[in-house]
Amino acid sequence: WIHASAPTTNVQPTLNGIAYISGYQDWKIISTTDRFDNHTMRVIFGNDVAIKAIAENNIHPWPDGTIFAKGAWAQQVDENGDTKTGQFIQVEFMIKDHQKYASTEGWGFARWRGTDLKPYGKDAAFTSECTGCHKPVRENDYVYSFPLTGQQ
Amino acid sequence: WIHASAPTTNVQPTLNGIAYISGYQDWKIISTTDRFDNHTMRVIFGNDVAIKAIAENNIHPWPDGTIFAKGAWAQQVDENGDTKTGQFIQVEFMIKDHQKYASTEGWGFARWRGTDLKPYGKDAAFTSECTGCHKPVRENDYVYSFPLTGQQ
Ligand code: HEC
Ligand code: HEC
């Protein structure tokens, strides 16, 4: 039910040097959110390393190689009243490599917007928005979508 | 589809003096989240003041009287494979009153846990957990669930 987002050839890397990762729509879904206020659906996917780490409860910290993708789509309601993903809005990634991404808390942050998958941000410092917002969950290795202590 | 959570008589107020608010399950739903990792569903409700503020785009800041409720339930899958709310886990509230709750960023924070609706926290300082986690969205008047700038 997750529509192809866009052609994924010739997608430019982000300004912090991260190349686009295609195929995340086939990863395992960790959570989905329907936002009725702004008519969006968000889906969070984890790659194999993430899913294995969850199964083995090996998430403090998450192992290098873990990748999360968070996609946002316009919400579409079909004939049965079921909500489906409509037009693609953006995709964000967090890629764990504690050495390579040491300056951004051990994660490579990347966001591409729109059906033309335009890299987000004016310069590489866009990542401070990401790290700023993910800091409250530093006890969770900066990841919101897994066992939030005191938050379940 | 949202099960009655628990008897709501004789519920103790939180340690920061907030009385339990019953009937939030009848408010308008702003968003729902299915969490497949820990098998929970979360539903965020807004009271009439919140819904009117959204309609009028009057949310910077949210008007006094705004209330958000966030409920968490165990996830239950029915015969049709549809997910429904199962056992009640907790409910949290944010109640806007910029004077009364000036010391906690203008919001009264409250959480009750379990089917016996036990007030959360050891003392009134539990609110620092809430404000700490909601601080990254201070530009949004500490609310996550509405137009997140740069986050749609
Ligand atoms: C306004 C706050 C905010 C900003 C800014 C932000 N995030 Fe997030 N992010 C969240 C929240 C909250 C979640 C949890 C899921 C949800 O509520 O949508 C999340 C979830 C994610 C996830 C899924 C993994 C997880 O932690 O649950 C990824 C990937 C992600 N964000 C990437 C990014 C990237 C890349 C940027 C910057 C370009 C960014 N985020 C900026 C708040 C933010
Ligand atoms: C670990 C981080 C964290 C902590 C601690 C936290 N919150 Fe939140 N809260 C969030 C996030 C993220 C959201 C957005 C919805 C979601 O992802 O579930 C949210 C949403 C809410 C909402 C719905 C309105 C909104 O902002 O979207 C309420 C109400 C709420 N929280 C109350 C509380 C209360 C009360 C406490 C403390 C007793 C608390 N929260 C502690 C992260 C946190």
Image (cartoon, coloured by chain):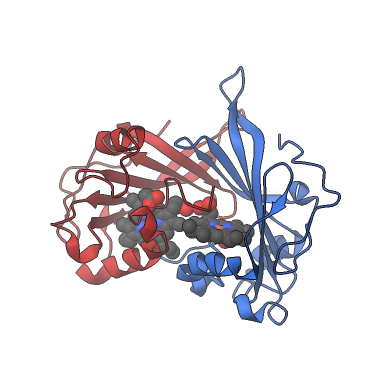
Chain colours: A blue, B red
**Rendering coords of residue A124 (x, y %):** 65, 69
Quadrant containing ligand 1 reads: bottom right
Task: Determine the residue positioned at 59% across, 54% down.
Answer: B37
Residue closest to the far front? A122
User: Is residue B33 in view from this perspective?
Assistant: yes
Of A96 and A18, the residue lying toward us? A18
As displayed, is residue A122 above or below residue B144? Answer: below
Q: Nearer the viewer, residue B58 or B136?
A: B58
Q: Of A144 and A94, which appears nearest the observer?
A: A94
User: Please, is residue B135 above or below residue B73 in the view?
Assistant: below
Q: Splitting the image into 4 quarters, where does residue B17 fall?
A: bottom left
- Quadrant of the frame with the N terminus of chain A: top right
Residue B122 visible in image: no
- Farthest top residue in view: A79
**Residue A93, placed above or below residue B56:** below
Q: Position of residue B139 (x, y in %)?
A: 38, 58
Residue B76 position within the rendered picture, expressed as x and y whole percent measured from the top left: 52, 40
Q: Nearer the viewer, residue A50 or A11?
A: A11
Residue at image location 59% in from the left, 35% down from the top: A74
Residue lying at 33% horizontally and 55% vertically, measured from the top left: B141
Q: Position of residue A140 (x, y in %)?
A: 53, 70
